[in-house]
Amino acid sequence: MSEGDLSWPLRRAVGLHADSVAVVDQGRAVTYAELSERVTALGRGLDELSVEAGGRVGYLGVNSLAHLECWLGVPAAGRTLVDLNFRLTEAELAFIVDDCELEVLVVDSAGLEIGRSLRLACPTLRELVRDTSGACPADCVPYEQLVADRPGDSPPALNPADLAAISYTGGTTGKPKGVMLSHANLLANARHNLIATGHRPSDRWLHVCPMFHVAGTANVFACTWAGGRHVVLPRFDAHDVLRAIDREAITHTVLVPTMLAMLLEQLEAEPDRSLRSLRHIQYAASPISPELQRRVLERFDCEIVQFYGMTEAAPTVTCCTAEDHRRGFAQDPVRARRLRSIGAPVVGVEAEVRGPAGQAMPAGEVGEIWVRGPNVMLGYWKRPDATREAIVDGWYRSGDVAYADEDGYLYLVDRLKDMIITGGENVYSIEVESALAEHEAVREAAVFGVPDPRWGEAVHAVVMVNEDRAVTEGELIAHCRGRIGGYKVPRTIDLRTEPLPKSGAGKVLKSRLREPFWAAAAQKP
């Protein structure tokens, strides 16, 4: 068995911490010895389901012990994990299942019916595994049966370059792209996080970001490698998070800024919460406002750290450290400026700001962030053209626009112009525009992000409608709900009958439409 595959972190943990609690899920505690037995059995269960080496196995559901075990076990058994976003519509999920030729899908109770529909609609999907401790329907395999101890061969020897996971991201062409992450990619990210965070066996990590999201899995292998304890919550609820921190003596967690804002609101209702065990909070996945950042630093007496990355980098690229946050909060002039940054590249990763011709840009000059390191993806699943466009001479072109200061700290100027980050989720405007365009009253549509105090950005649309076909904002929102995931649906829509502003090349000038919203937000105290 190669040391470069994803079985390594768990093998080390069980060798050193066999009797320590590895996972706590809804009151159920599993030791590292038990976790290792279950993960090994999962591989043998996939053998019995006739999943060949490299075959795709999916998970559709909230965070759980089984969800965590799929991340630890499916790649280690030589298969490929496809973690599905449960917020997507059935049509969006069906595209992904067909695209990656998914064979087996593990579903929780909420995902059972959609799983059944996908099995009927998608030719390659032949088995549903039900993640439940209770009665299992006859048309599903019980997950606990899959992880029951059984004799079998040792797990296969794996190559670090073998495909471990396919993580789908929104696509600028309107269809999601499958990011291919190898064992080496995910192990490299774990090493980088071990260095940046300083994982220890005494750590108790609260996993509350959804595990289909890179923010939800960024520390899974690092925490396991160190022998720390995973505490799993199925979904984010501010009250439940506060209770879990106190009950389980949580030391570390990762939250998106939206979650931090909700947590601060809940703390006003529960002012007696001490949270004395909490040593380290990471935030990631979307920009944070200066006001929210200030409130977080005032309220939490622990390390506050920002990470920036993307699925294609497995995901960690840069880090704005706890020292940067505290010294900046103390108004050290240099550090105060750095609080507006996304930090500097973590150990093991290179990140440069480059111009249109790929040339390195001097400090202060705006360009695109290029990323290189052992964590950068293999490429996009069945998308060689997209892969060639994204990876140039080993460097991944992020599409994010930034500048660097003289010390190498990066400052985001803009995201991909067609992408909106709302509550930590990426929304590509073309997907929303395509859904709007299917309505007979719509002639043109432009979708972009506008400032939102809770979600960071909210999805907003400007729509030119046919004068002879009356339609309301509510009707168009309802129309979108049947076609795209709920978080992608516009929260607000401006209706007009005049054409949208365009460039000389005929492209809609979204910057002109977007600018008044952000200018107004900048003027607010």
Image: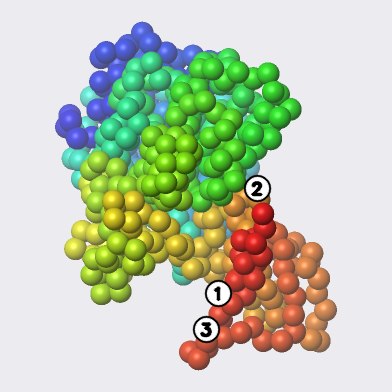
Residue 511: numbered disc: 1
Crowding at mark 3 (Cα within 10 Å: few <14, some 14-19, many 20+):
few
Residue type, numbered disc 2 = Arg
Q: Looking at the image, do the residues carrying marks 2 and 1 touch, with CB atoms under 8 Å apart? A: no
Measure the alpha-carbon separation of dots 2 and 1.
Answer: 23 Å
Image position of 419 with respect to 256: above or below: below
- Quadrant of image for the N terminus: top left
Measured Cα–Cα span from mark 2 to mark 3: 31 Å
User: Are the residues flagged by discs 3 and 1 in contact, CB closer than 8 Å?
Assistant: no
Residue with the mark numbered 3: 507
Residue 24, percent across and down?
Answer: 50, 18
- Identity of the amino acid at label 3? Lys
User: In percent of the image, x 81 and y 71: which residue is there?
Assistant: 472
Q: Quadrant of the C terminus?
A: bottom right
Disc 2: which residue:
454
User: In the drawing, does residue 389 fall left or right of residue 496?
Assistant: left
Q: Marks 3 and 1, Cα distance to the nearest angstrom? A: 11 Å
